Amino acid sequence: MHVAVIGLGEVGRCFAEPLLRAGYQVSLCEARPSPAAIELAQKLDLPIHPDAGDWLRDANWVLSCVTGAVSLAVTKQVGAHMAHGAAIADFTTASPAVKREGAEVAANSSVRYVDVAIMGGILINRERTPLLIAGEGAAEFKPVMEKTGGRVKTIEGGAAGDAMSLKILRSVFTKGMEALAVELLMSAEKQGVRDKLYEQLLDIDQTPLRDFIEMLVRTHVVHAKRRAHEVNDAQGELTAQGMPSTVLPGVEERFRKTARALEAHPLSLPEPDIHQALYWLLANGR
């Protein structure tokens, strides 16, 4: 099997050697090779192609490891040289919309397209970094990467763009939680109650994550006005401690936006389920 790696930045360099070690024929491509890329190519005894060309004709897989800004352009360039039925795996950080468009571009060249989202720090875990994949050819791509030692999860029935969408949504959750955790534990530490705080969070710790976040949304559309006042009070307390919050002003605005929408479009159900709550929010609370 012939695998071509387009782009020899951190991602491309990370996977090139494991692919070769797994027994694949490997080709490298980089328009402006860095010293690190040149060193890797010399180590692997492989030439570096400066651009896409007929050398891609017998490539079964092309790993697009360029920047997200040129993802679509590279898909167009390499697709024009690939054999029908071959496949592109887009490792870039392009947006879900760009990856969906990339899949269409690839299809126009009779080439399959896999959306790959890198779900961790590539410099830490190298080829073992978890990958989330979706799109035509995802099922076939999974064993290709697993042979290198990779950890790959396929989104069943997923289309191109779904992997990147889920990566971004995960970041919304984890980065938002991170910012809140920083402010929470700084305040708790300053007050000398950090250990006691964990005891007060045990009920949350013992609740399945899905149940917890859905409960927050279901009750948000009922109690947003009251909770907005509670958030305002919490901000006042942090300010009094000399640690004004940078996170809670946005949280308060989210609650007040929902409260204003409730005044204009009252909820007809006292205890909506998650589907009803989200339907109302999408219709009124944006």
Image: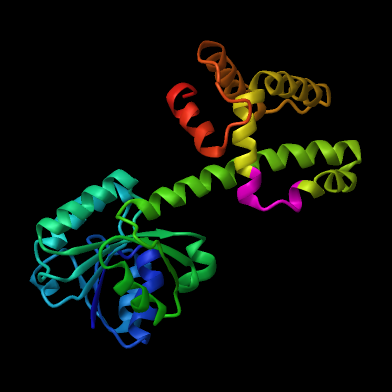
Residue situated furthest bottom in the rendering:
23
User: Is the residue 195 above or below the residue 218 in the image?
Assistant: below
Provide residue 72's location: percent of width, then percent of height. 22, 50
In the picture, residue 85 is in which quadrant?
A: bottom left
Magenta highlight range: 204-212
Q: In which quarter of the image is the N terminus?
A: bottom left
Which residue shows up at 34% across the image and 57% down it? 158
In magenta stretch: residue 211? yes
User: Is the residue 214 above or below the residue 145 in the image?
Assistant: above
Provide residue 43's location: percent of width, then percent of height. 35, 82
State the residue in front, 113 or 4: 113
State the residue in front, 188 or 44: 188
Dominant secondary structure (helix, strand or loop) of the stretch shown in magenta? helix
Please indicate, yes or no, whether residue 70 appears anywhere in the rendered image: no
Which residue shows up at 59% across the image and 26% down it? 221
Q: Is residue 70 left or right of residue 127?
A: left
